[in-house]
Each structure stands twice: as structure tokens, then as C-alpha cells.
Image: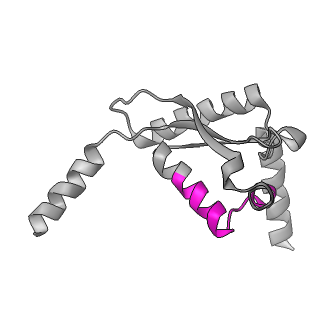
């Protein structure tokens, strides 16, 4: 029994997951939410589950899910990374870059979508410096 569990865990680790970028499109108002994950079916299922239970971290998306109903939303895969043997950190970096490209292309911000614009490197550094100053007080 224990050997079977070890074997199954090892097979799972060696299995190539479907990594990529997806969108959740509200067909009632045209707004979209763009996201990504190392396991597309898993991440899309997680978002669906959170929305169904009413606990999604994106409050605007959650409100529209309740207002329009789940039938008004569709999950769509926008892009996938080709499975290959690379370190997970490198795969994650590629995935962030791919998601950034789709965010730039679709601009799902404000009236067009549910995403928040990403901070620039300079903005991130300013935010970190401000937090350090506040912590030092």
C-alpha cells in the first residue's frame, strides 16, 4: 500500500501539467478576468469554486457572479506553455511573462475587466520603502 502511494506521488510529480493563461469572461457585460497557473484545469476549478461559495478575493467579480449568475460566465484558455523539462522557478517566470503579455493585450482593467493594473518595478520599490519607514516608526 505504501509503495503504491509513493509510486503514485512520483508519477504525479513527473506528469506534465497544463500551464498557461486563461480568462473568465462575463458574457452579460463583456468584462474579463485574466489569470494564469501551472495547472490550468486546477486553477480554473479553484476560481469557479471560490465564486460559487461566495469567497473570491476579487469582490467586483464576485458581485457580478452573484448578479448575473454562473451561466453568464465562461472560462477560456488563452495560451499554454509547451510542456518541457525545466525548473519550476523558470516555468513560473515564463508564466508571469506570458500573463503580462495578455494583460497588456486585453487591458482588462476598470470598465473593461476585473484585473488591477500591475505595479511597475519603481512603484514596488517605493511601496517597500514606505513600509520600511512605517515599520521604523
Image point 79% across, 41% down: which residue?
31
Front residue of 26 and 17: 26
Does the segment drawn in magenta span residue 130?
Answer: no
Image point 27% across, 50% down: which residue?
12
The colour scheme is: one colour
Tell me: residue 4, above or below residue 28: below
Front residue of 85 and 55: 55
Place of residue 113 in the rendered image (x, y in percent of width and height, measured from the top left): 80, 42
Image point 32% across, 32% down: which residue?
85
In terms of image quadrants, where is residue 69?
bottom right
Place of residue 109 in the rendered image (x, y in percent of width and height, measured from the top left): 83, 40
Place of residue 137 in the rendered image (x, y in percent of width and height, measured from the top left): 87, 74
* Left or right of 17 in this view: 71: right
**Which stretch did the figure color magenta?**
45-62
Quick one: which residue is furthest to the front in this view?
Answer: 71
Front residue of 69 and 97: 69
Does the segment drawn in magenta span residue 53?
Answer: yes
Front residue of 101 and 59: 59
Q: Quadrant of the N terminus?
A: bottom left
* Left or right of 12 in this view: 97: right
Image point 60% across, 55% down: which residue?
47
In terms of image quadrants, where is residue 39?
top left
Specify the principal SS of the magenta part. helix
Tell me: residue 1, above or below residue 121: below
Amino acid at each position: 500500500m505504501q509503495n503504491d502511494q509513493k509510486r503514485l506521488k512520483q508519477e504525479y510529480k513527473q506528469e506534465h501539467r497544463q500551464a498557461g493563461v486563461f480568462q473568465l469572461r462575463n458574457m452579460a457585460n463583456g468584462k474579463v478576468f485574466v489569470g494564469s497557473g501551472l495547472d490550468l484545469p486546477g486553477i480554473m476549478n479553484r476560481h469557479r469554486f471560490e465564486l460559487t461559495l461566495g469567497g473570491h478575493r476579487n469582490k467586483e467579480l464576485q458581485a457580478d457572479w452573484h448578479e448575473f449568475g454562473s451561466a453568464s460566465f465562461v472560462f477560456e484558455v488563452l495560451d499554454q506553455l509547451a510542456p518541457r523539462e525545466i525548473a519550476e522557478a523558470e516555468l513560473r517566470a515564463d508564466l508571469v511573462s506570458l500573463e503580462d503579455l495578455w494583460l497588456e493585450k486585453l487591458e482588462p482593467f476598470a470598465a473593461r475587466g476585473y484585473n488591477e493594473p500591475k505595479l511597475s518595478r519603481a512603484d514596488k520599490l517605493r511601496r517597500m520603502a514606505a513600509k520600511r519607514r512605517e515599520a521604523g516608526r
